[in-house]
Structure formats: structure tokens, C-alpha cells
Amino acid sequence: MSSSVSPLAPKNVPDMPAIAGVRLATAEAGIRYKNRTDVLLALLDPGTAVAGVFTTSKCPSAPVEWCRAKLKGGKARALVVNSGNANAFTGKTGRASTALTAKIAAKAVGCSESEIFLASTGVIGEPLDATKFDGVLGRLAESAAPADWLSAAKAIMTTDTFPKVATATVKLGKAKVTINGMAKGAGMIAPDMATMLSFIFTDAPIAPAALQALLKSGVEDTFNAVTIDGDTSTSDTLLAFATGAAAEHGAPKISRASDPRLKAFTKAFHQVLANLAEQVARDGEGARKLVEITVEGAKTKASARRIAMSIANSPLVKTAIAGEDANWGRVVMAVGKAGEPADRDKLSISFNGIRVAKSGARDPSYDEAQVSEAMKAPEIAIKVSLGLGKGRDRVLTCDLTKEYVAINGDYRS
Amino acid sequence: MSSSVSPLAPKNVPDMPAIAGVRLATAEAGIRYKNRTDVLLALLDPGTAVAGVFTTSKCPSAPVEWCRAKLKGGKARALVVNSGNANAFTGKTGRASTALTAKIAAKAVGCSESEIFLASTGVIGEPLDATKFDGVLGRLAESAAPADWLSAAKAIMTTDTFPKVATATVKLGKAKVTINGMAKGAGMIAPDMATMLSFIFTDAPIAPAALQALLKSGVEDTFNAVTIDGDTSTSDTLLAFATGAAAEHGAPKISRASDPRLKAFTKAFHQVLANLAEQVARDGEGARKLVEITVEGAKTKASARRIAMSIANSPLVKTAIAGEDANWGRVVMAVGKAGEPADRDKLSISFNGIRVAKSGARDPSYDEAQVSEAMKAPEIAIKVSLGLGKGRDRVLTCDLTKEYVAINGDYRS
């Protein structure tokens, strides 16, 4: 956890309403950090549906493997998250550790171990001593309350400089339902589950399969469209929980994601995901600028995505932005290396609305002083027009600063 | 051009012998830099064979397009290289500029324009004023001499901190033949023609098709196995020239790369490429450590290469090395994100010969103090054993330091 908050942090933190069926509690278990909370317990009322998407890493963490297996049941009674230790690459010890954590949690909550969901974030390769949860989880289960979402978001932070929460309230049928989310990110952030950890909660009565479909389509243009350093964590986890409590005041039970009654909810759900994903980019390690890359005129949306990601992950583009240099030559380089269809002589590039290149060469009307001034802004929008087709996509990233190197040069020590 | 030489620069620069049929000259054309040479002319005797491999960028520079087209003729009389301006993404102006440069050079040399090969390196997107070559190339053609290879290597530098040359002498038949090479690199270095610019010269009588085959197989484990930042230049060019002058003292004329008489030559040729490629890694922008990544036990060599590259291009691995931290958890992460077959529970990792992880968990015998001491070395060897098959590969890279960010945050300005 850094001492100074990212200059890109949102100015306002939303009031997070309670969600019927969800109670939260945090504690200091002393797993790694001193004098800060590092365990979150979220208690979920019986009948809560669960859905999840995870890292595509071939070396996933023990908690990711645990959640994948338990997701088949579709029901959750509790989520246990710890920060400071990822319980990844910990071999048999890691599996034993997740099993023990689930056992302790199930006893504290009074449910089956298969209804316990786990996430861990922090150092990789260090054994996680799950006995530290013994006692702690019991006390948390007793004290859990609907209120304090910000404390929950703080307890899951590692190198994050601010807690990330988002909320939306929307009509489902004639009932008001709420969606709350939290996330932690900062580094080792790349698509194929972009965030390290994010959790979404709603009181809407949505069946597991529908929730899963909603989540899967929701991440595509949100968490999967964010990259900080192109690195993919072994622990990336996004879980969604639907308690169904809103059914009591008339919300219809939803069994299919395509249900037309879900339209407004789906939109709000995506907004919460998009909001959290943007906060992850705003808290990229060492970030001083939020960078939005839009690629249009590509052959397909997938092609636009690959080109946008090639730009977003280019160290040379990212360092140029850190240096407030509208170095569009490096954008051309990144377009070229993406391996996607591109015609140099049709390419146009703009920075914050100022076109610097068109038809494969420098825009004759481009004023260096004007662009340099624009590059001082904390938010930089790069737009690339390929002129080949109708494929369009957008990704978010941040600049690459000396602070990124400093943070990651001595994170473990 | 940086003022301080990379601490990883080779301690000794080899004496570079003359190569019959090659004469060199350099000049200050004032293209971008002040008070330093920025143009190289290499004159080649009639009958010189040429081969080349280039960037796979979809937005190649004008000189790359020029060379690709002229390579079909198989013959070269001159190479013109300028530093300071890449003549890339310069549209029609760029094509006009290469044509004019070739015209001026052909006149100076007294040959066909199709026998002129061109390479440019430097800023992208700025028009290159080829009229600056007028007069300069004529004078260079008159003064060209066999001697000064180091001056030639200096004239093609941009952010390089030292000139890169290599040489080998070997028997072809009963005759002694020589291979000289030079390269420039530093940043925007990634496979699919890894170096920005490199030129190899030999007096061996090798036909264009054989030389091309030799070059293509030679780059695979040399220049294409080097990465600095994962970025691919629009200008990456490697050209090889064989004057054939050694035929006069009895070297056999070679028309096929598979000719058994070429065995020793092929080995020496690869050594020159490997030597230059390593120098490029040693001069990675801001580099303080040379990093060799070996992946063994993969399903195939190609799979080992992709995993090695995933490790080599991971900002988190590279910053950890800069911080002298044997953070093998990040190596696991990079193995996992490569998308190649990997079994966490069979994975072993060592740093400079010290095994830190085995069978999917921390090596119980691993001594943190010993590893920390080893990480202070200027050369770091990371070995990953997957335990799945016989695929093995090796790539070179460097660490990611604050200096990389500084160099690239204000390169253009």
C-alpha cells in the first residue's frame, strides 16, 4: 500500500448503500502487513447465486482453482478475501491452505465448505498460514454488518493507493435493486481477467446461469479492456453474488440473461464493472496519466482490440506519454507490430482531439506547441483511424513512469 | 546517443580486419545530430551478392520497402545508412526521399539505382531531406577506404551508448575468408527482426540465394532471440553482403546454403550474428543487467521460445531484476500468461544456478541471502524447467530501469 494517493483517483467516493442479504466485516490477521486490515469476510444469505470469471493463466493460484471447482454448485454463503499473500505457486501446501481456510469459514458461518468462495492477493510463492484465520473468521461472522463497503474495499488492497467502490440502483420489474462493487488492482493487470480481484453484489434475484452470462459479457469491454503492464496475474478473480433479497419486495426472479426485464439491470451492471475497471487504470502503479486508446476503422472489433492493446502495452508509447510527448511515431510502431491489417497510407492519429498524422504522414496543419500543451492533461485520449472497415474498440491504460519501476523494483523486499 | 556508456559494454573491442571488396566512409550530414557522424557509405565491388531480413511490421519504413524490392536482383554496389531520421511514416515524401537518395548514391558510385541499399534510423514521422546527401555521397565515394569499421559502426548509432562490431575469420575450402558485422540497437527491439539495423560483410563467394538462406536461419536464435522492450521497429533491417573477392585466392563459389564446404563458415557467421545480438541486449536502453532466460522441458522449442519471451518481456520480471530481487513468483506469472502448456506442479526455477522453486513451490533448501547476493551480478541467468518435454530455447534481454523511462520519456524532445 503506497503512502501517496494516485493523482488520478476519483474526486468523489460514492455513498455505498446496504444490500439486503450481504453483511461485511474486516480484520487485521497480520498475514503480511502491519497495522492495517487484511481480511474481508462477506456473509451472504442462504440462496445467494454466484458467478465468476478468472485468470487465463496456466499457473493459477490455489484460491482460483478452489473457486472454479465450487462455482459448479452455483450457491454461495460467504466470501473470504485476504491481502498480502496470493497463495499462488505454493504447491500442495497451497491447496491444503485453501481447504483449511474454507473449513474454518464454513464452521464460522454454519454452511457447507462448497459454499465458501476464496480470493487471495499479494506475494506469490510464500506459503499462506491459514491457521491465522482461526478465531478471526468466527469473530468476523459475529460482527458482520451491512454497512461499511469502503472498509471492505480497503482490506483487499495491496499496492493500490485508494479503495475502489462503485454502486448503481435500478428498477427490476417494479422493484428497486442495488448493485455494489469493489475492486483492487494496481499492477500485474492485463486482459483475460484484467483485475486481480473484484467482487460485485446485488439483491436482484438472478439465477446462477443468468448471472454467469451477465458477468461474462460484462467483462469484455470493461475489465478485459484494461491493461497496466501487460502482465496477467495468477490470481485474477471477479465474482458476482446475487442474494435475491429484492424478490421480497416484488423483483421478478430472472433465470435467463436474455430476459427483457433485465435490460436496465444489465446496463447498470455493466456501468459498475466499467467504473471499477476505470478506477483500476487510474490506480496503475506509478500512473500519472489515464490513457484511453480508441481504434476505429479496423477490419473487425477483435482486430481493433488487438491493435489498441498493442499500443496500450507498448513501453515506448507509455514512456512517451509519461514524458508528455505526443510521439505518434511510436503509435505507428505499435500499430505495425500488432500484426493486424493496417495500411500505413490510410492511417490517422490524434491526441486529445488534435490530429497529428493523416494519410500515412504528419498532418501538415499540426501545431507542435498546441499538442505539447494538450499532453500536459492528466487524461490522454489517443485515437487511431485505420480507414479499412467498421471495427472499433477502446481500451484503458496508464503511462509508464519511473515510479512504476521503483514500486516494482522493491515490492517483495 | 547517451553520454555514459552502458556498464554491460564488452570490455574489449576486436580489431576489425579489412574485407576485400568493401570500402567504408562516414560523414556529418547534419540530418539531426550536431557534431557527430550520421551517414555511412559502404562501397561494394561489382558482383557482390546481397541478402536481407526485415521487420514484420505492417507499417514498415520507406527504406525497408525499398530494400525488399531491390533484394530481388540479388546484387549490391553500395549501402547508405543514415542515423537521426528513420524516414518512416513519411508517406509519399518518404518514398520520394528514398528514390532521391538512391539516385544520388548511384551517381556517386557509378551503378544502377537497383544496386543501392538503404537504411535509416531515428525519429519516425519527420520528413527526411535527401538533398542533404547531395555532394556528401560523392565525396564519401571518393574517400572510401577498407579500414575503419568502428567509425562506420559509430555513424549508425542513435541512443546506443557504444558501437557494436564483431568479426570472425574462417576457412572456406582452403582459403581464409573474413566476416565482419556491425549493429545498432538500444530500444524498440523485439523479435521478428530484432535489431533495428545490422550489416554483415564477407569476402566469401556466396550466391544471393545461399546467403539469404544462411541469414534467415542465422537470425532465428540470435537477433530474433533478443528483446529489450517487446516493441518492434518499423525499420528493423539486417543485410548481408558477400563480395566474393576470396575466390581470387581459391575460395570455392557456393551456390547452396546446404553445401558441406560451408559448414565452418556457417558456424562463424552465426557466431558473428550472436555476438552482435548480445551486444544489442548489453546496450538495452537504461540496462544495468544482461539477462539470459533459458526454458527447458517445454513441449517444443517454439513453446519454449514463447514462454522465454513472455518472461523476457514482462515489465514485472524486468523491474524485479533491476531491483536485484529474485522474484520467482513473477517468473511463474509470466510462464502462466504465455498461454503455452505448463504444469505448475512440475515447474522449477533457478537464478544464476541457485534453484529457488521446484515442483510448483518454493525450494525448501533455498537461502534468500545467497540468492540476494547472486542477484547483484551484472549478468543474470534465469532457468525455467517445465518438466513436460524436450523443447528448449534461450533468449536475451535486460532489466527495466528508471533510466529506460528517462531515456524514452524525452527522446523526441
Image: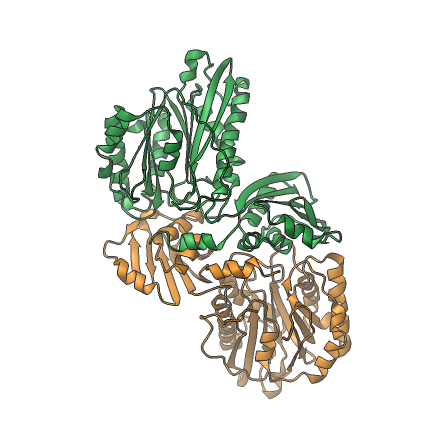
Chain colours: A green, B orange
Identify the residue shown where x is 53% and y is 30%: A271
At horizontal 27% and vertical 32% (from top left) the residue drawn is A102
The percent coordinates of residue B303 (x first, y second) are 44, 53
| Residue A73 pos. (x, y %) | 35, 26
Res. A126 in view: yes
Is residue B300 visible in the rendered image? The answer is: no
* Count of numbered badges drawn on the protein: 0
Image quarter in which the N terminus of chain B is found: bottom right
The answer to which image quadrant residue B163 occupies is: bottom right
Q: Is residue B244 above or below residue A80?
A: below
Residue B12 drawn at (x, y percent): 46, 79
Percent coordinates x, y for residue A388 in the rendering: 69, 44
Q: Quadrant of residue A389?
A: top right
Q: Is residue A333 above or below residue B184?
A: above
Q: Nearer the viewer, residue B352 or B243?
A: B352
Horizontal side, residue B75 vs residue B96: left or right: left
- Asked if residue B34 lies left or right of residue A139, the reply is right
Q: Quadrant of the C terminus of chain B?
A: bottom right
- Identify the residue at horizontal 54%, vertical 26% (top origin): A267
